[in-house]
Amino acid sequence: MWLSYAESDASGKAGTAVGYGRLSEDATQLTNFTVVFRQQPKLSVGNHFGGRLVFDGKGYLFIGLGENNQRATAQDLSKLQGKVVRLTETGGVPPDNPFVGRADARPEIWAYGIRNPQGMAMNPWSEALWLNEHGPRGGDEINIPQAGKNYGWPLATHGINYSGLPIPEAKGKTVPGTEPPLYVWPVSPGVSGMAFYSAPTFPQWQHKLFIGALKETSLIVLAVDGNQVREEGRLLEARGKRIRDVRVGPDGYLYVLTDESNGELLRLSPEA
């Protein structure tokens, strides 16, 4: 079993760590737990950890890392904040990672300029990694992180600071040398986990992308056509629950996890 978690040090600051262990037969503990990755340096005082894990089926693990609410670090290749990193399934650095061999960059980095990634998944039709992330006040995004590319934060953003003032480092919604988002919500729904639907169980859900919404307490439905998406609607709005994660089960049903003090695991099928 693989998991990511927030790990603090003696200074009280924290970063994302990733490891794996074996679940005991009685499902009460992990044994032989091994840490394979630690976000360095540790800068967070409780914000923007990220931590989504995606195996690509080709021997690699992608980890989405928040910038710990330290905006400038997302553009600093010597730090692991605000990055997507790519490792082998045993935690090693692949020799074809884009910054291997550069003295001024961490070799684990796959892509950078990320604010606070919340959902990641492999697109089953293109076999590309997709990621969603929280903007500040406005500007939640979907991106397709590619090797060595810069996704802009905090230089490029569609949002503003929570104070209502501009992001100090921002130069506009698009900035030369950075990749524009695939999709933007000008008003942030508070995106979370995401899942592509390619199961044969419910044909009406084929080529749909489902994304949880924390702030807007719903399940967002998007249609996927190549590298284009359009929002088609929302599910579960009447329940008024923060959606933390969504997955497609082996039975083809959607499983949705709510983020509440009395959280629920929901099993969904299309309406008849």
Image (spheres, rainbow, N blue to C red):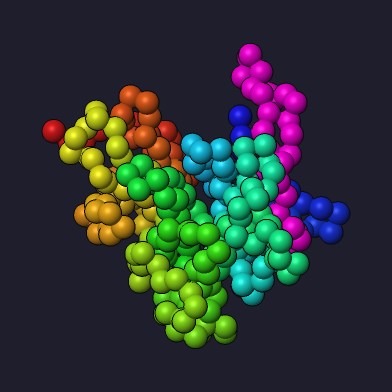
Q: Please tell me which residue lies in front, 259 or 90.
A: 90
Residue at figure coordinates x 24%, y 30% from the top left: 200
Q: Is residue 27 above or below residue 169?
A: above
Q: Quadrant of residue 229?
A: bottom left
Q: Magenta stretch?
A: 17-43
Q: Position of residue 108 (x, y in %)?
A: 66, 54
The quadrant in which the N terminus is found is top right
Magenta region includes residue 37: yes
Q: Is residue 237 left or right of residue 177?
A: left
Q: Which residue ends up furthest to the right in the rendered image?
A: 10
Q: Position of residue 83 (x, y in %)?
A: 59, 60
The quadrant in which the C terminus is found is top left
Q: Which residue ends up furthest to the left in the rendered image?
A: 272
In the rendered image, is residue 46 in sight? Answer: no
Q: Position of residue 195 (x, y in %)?
A: 38, 43
In the rendered image, is residue 54 in sight? Answer: yes
Residue at figure coordinates x 63%, y 14% from the top left: 26
Q: Position of residue 86 (x, y in %)?
A: 60, 50
Q: Please tell me which residue lies in front, 171 or 212.
A: 171
Magenta region includes residue 257: no
Q: How many marks?
A: 0
Q: Quadrant of residue 106?
A: bottom right
Residue at figure coordinates x 61%, y 55% from the top left: 97
Residue at figure coordinates x 74%, y 34% from the top left: 34
Q: Quadrant of residue 44?
A: bottom right
Q: Please tell me which residue lies in front, 183 or 9.
A: 183
